[in-house]
Image: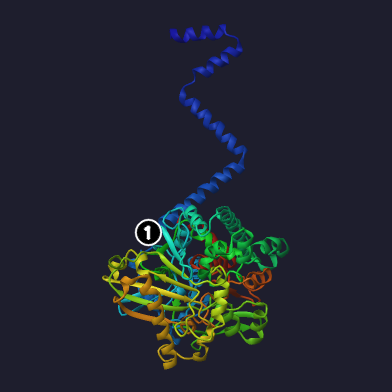
Amino acid sequence: RLARRRRRRVRAALVPGQRATCRIRARGSAQRVAETRTSCAGQNSACPAMALCESLALFILGAALLIFLQRRQRYAHWRDIDPSILKNGASAKKLAACGDADYVIVGSGLGGLTSAALLSRAGFKCVVLEQHDVAGGSTHTFTEKGFTFDVGVHYVGSVLDRWWSPVRKLVAVTAPGVEWDEVDEVLDAVVNDVTGESFEVHKDPTKKAAAYASIEAGSAAAVRRYRRCCFLTKLVAFTLLGCKLLPRWLMPKRLLGRAWRWAFERSAKDVLARCGLSERVAGACAYIYGTYGEIPSRTPFAMHAMLEQHYDKGGFFPRGGSAVLGLAQVKEINDAGSHVFVRARVDQILLEGNKCVGVSCKGVAIKARCGVISGAGVANTFGRMLPKEVGAPILAKLKGCDPSLGFAYLFIGLDGTAEELGIKNTNLWYMAPGGSSNWDHDIANERVEASAEPFGSTDERPPVVLISPGSAKDSTWNERHPGTATLQMIAAPMPYSWVEKFEGTKPGHRGPEYDAMMDRMEKYLLERYLYRILPQTKGRVVYTSSASPLTFNFFLNAVRGETYALAHSLPRFSVDVQTSVLHPETDVENLFLTGQDVMTAGVVPSMVSGWLTTAYLSKYAILKAVLAWLFA
C-alpha cells in the first residue's frame, strides 16, 4: 500500500511526457514482445506481396523436400535391377494388350528413353518400340564367351563424382542409381604413328595446354588463344542450341544469324589456323576429331570446342558398364506404368491427313493420343517410316547433310585381369596423318576414302586407331568377370564402299569373301597395333569379334553404316537446317524428334535432347523434372 502511494506521488509530480515514459519502462518483457509481434504483423499486412513470396518459398521448399525424400526411398541401385527388362520382346499379342498410349517413342536410345522417363513420371502413358533385341541404343552391351563389351561409350566428360555437378544431376533424374568411376588423370595418350611424336592429355586444363604446346616450341601463346576461343564458342553454342526450346516460328533467325555463323559456320581447321597454331600443333589439338567422326575441315569449330571443353575436368565411366544407363531408365519407365519393347520394328508412322496418329508395328496399329516421338534419326523417320510424298520434301531441306563416317571395330577378350597385364584405363590414340608436316588429318582421311581396298590388304594405315580398355575403366569388372579383361579397337574411317556389295546379308552369313576381308583386317590390327603397343597381350587373346558398317545397319538400323547418324558437318549446323528440320517440332503435326540428330552425338547431348523434346511437349513434365534436378 505504501509503494502504491509513493508511485502516485511521483506520477503527480511529473509532466505528461515524463509520465508516458515512465509507463513504457514499467511494462514487463512479455508485454514488449507482444507489442513487437503486433508491429511486425502490421507491417506484413501492409505488404501482401511479401507475405505471398514467403508462402511461395515455403511451398517450393516443401515440394522439393518431398521430392528429395521420395527419391531417397524409391529408386533402386543399379545392382538391384533385373537386367531382363532390357530384353522385353514384343509380339502382336503383347502390343494389342498394351492398348493405345499418350506418346509412342520410336527407338530406345538415350534421347528416346529420357523423353519417355520424364513424360511417364508426369503421368503420360508411353510405349517405347526398339527394333534391336536389347534396349539402350549405343549404350547397350553384348556378352560372348563370358566377356561383356561396351559398344558405344568410352568415357563421359564433366565432373560426375560431385553432388553439385549439373551433368550428374541430369543423369540422376532419369537414370537414378547410376554410379561413376573416374578414368585416370591421363585421359588420352596420343601418338603420331608417322613421326613418333607423342603427348598425354590430362584432365587438368593447364597440363593439357602444355601438352599441346610441347609439339612445337614457341606455341604456348597460340595454344592459350585457342583455349580461350574454345571456351567462348562453347558458351555461344550451348545458348544457340538451347533456343530449340522455342517453337520454330518463334526462333529469331535474324537475331541468331550472326552469332550462329560465328560459332557453327567456321570450320575447326580454319579457326585453329586463325588462332596462330602451326599445322603440327593444330593437328595435335584436332586429335579428338575421331570422337565426333568428321575431319576438321568439314566440321564446325563449335562441335570441336564443345568436345575439347567437355573433358577439362576429367573423364568418367558408368560403374557396371554402359548398359546401366539404359537399365536405370527402363526401370523408371516401367515403374511409372509405361512399357519398353524390343524386337519391335516400326513399319510405318500412321497419318490422318498431315496429322500423326500412331504407328504400325507387327501388324498392330498403336494409337498415340498426344503424338509420336522418333529417336530413330531423321533418315529413318522421314525416309523409311513416312510415305514418300510426306518425307521426301523434308529430307530435301537437308542439303549437303550426309551420313557420318563408318568405323571398323574389333572386340578383344583377354585371359588375365587388366592389373595383371599392366593395362591402364587410358585411351590410346594412334594417328597416321599426312601432308608435309605429317599432322594433316584431312589428307589422310581423303586418301583412305578414295582407296578401294580395306586395311590389311594394302600398306595403307588407318588415319585413327583407338584402343579403349573397357574393363579397366569399370571398378566392378573383376567382381563380375574374374580373371578376364577386354579391349576395344576402332579403326576409322571404314568407307561404306568397301562393304556395300554385301548389303542385305545377315551377320554370320555374309559369305567367304566378306569373312576373309574381316579376318585380314583383324589380323592387321592385332599384329600392326595391339601386339606392338601392348606386347604383354600377345598369347593372352582368347576371343575376338569384328564389326563393320554393315553391323551398324543390322543392329542399330543405320542407313549406310554411319556411327553418328548425320555427319557433324558444316551444312548440318546451318541456321535453316537446325531450325526447320533438326528441331523437336516437325512439319508433320504431332510428330516430334529427339536423339543425337536434334543435338549432337554423345551421352550428355542425347539426354539433353530428351529434355528439350519433353520441355516442348509438356511444361508440367519439365517443371517436375527441373525440381527433381535441383535436388538430385
**Number of numbered discs visible in the structure rendering:** 1
Corner quadrant of residue 518: bottom left
* SS at badge 1: helix
Label 1: how many Cα within 10 Å (few below 14, some 14–19, many 20+) = few
Please state which of residues 377 and 497 is positioned toward the viewer in this rendering.
497
Circle 1 sits on which residue?
73
Q: Which residue in the rendered view is the most extreme toward the right?
A: 254
Quarter of the N terminus within the rendering: top left
Corner quadrant of residue 514: bottom left
Corner quadrant of residue 385: bottom right
Q: Position of residue 628 (x, y in %)?
A: 48, 58
Please state which of residues 371 and 19 is positioned toward the viewer in this rendering.
371
Please state which of residues 275 and 127 is positioned toward the viewer in this rendering.
275
Q: Is residue 152 visible?
A: yes
Residue under the point 30% across and 68% down: 421
Please state which of residues 557 and 427 is positioned toward the viewer in this rendering.
427
Residue under the point 59% across and 61% down: 278
Q: Position of residue 606 (x, y in %)?
A: 52, 68
From the viewer's perspective, is 308 left or right of 573?
left
Q: Is residue 624 above or below residue 106?
A: above
Q: Position of residue 224 (x, y in %)?
A: 56, 53
Q: Is residue 338 visible?
A: no
According to the image, what is the colour scheme of the structure? rainbow
Please name the amino acid that badge 1 sits on: Gln
Quarter of the C terminus within the rendering: bottom left
Q: Which residue in the rendered view is the most extreme toward the left?
A: 483
Q: Position of residue 343 (x, y in %)?
A: 44, 83
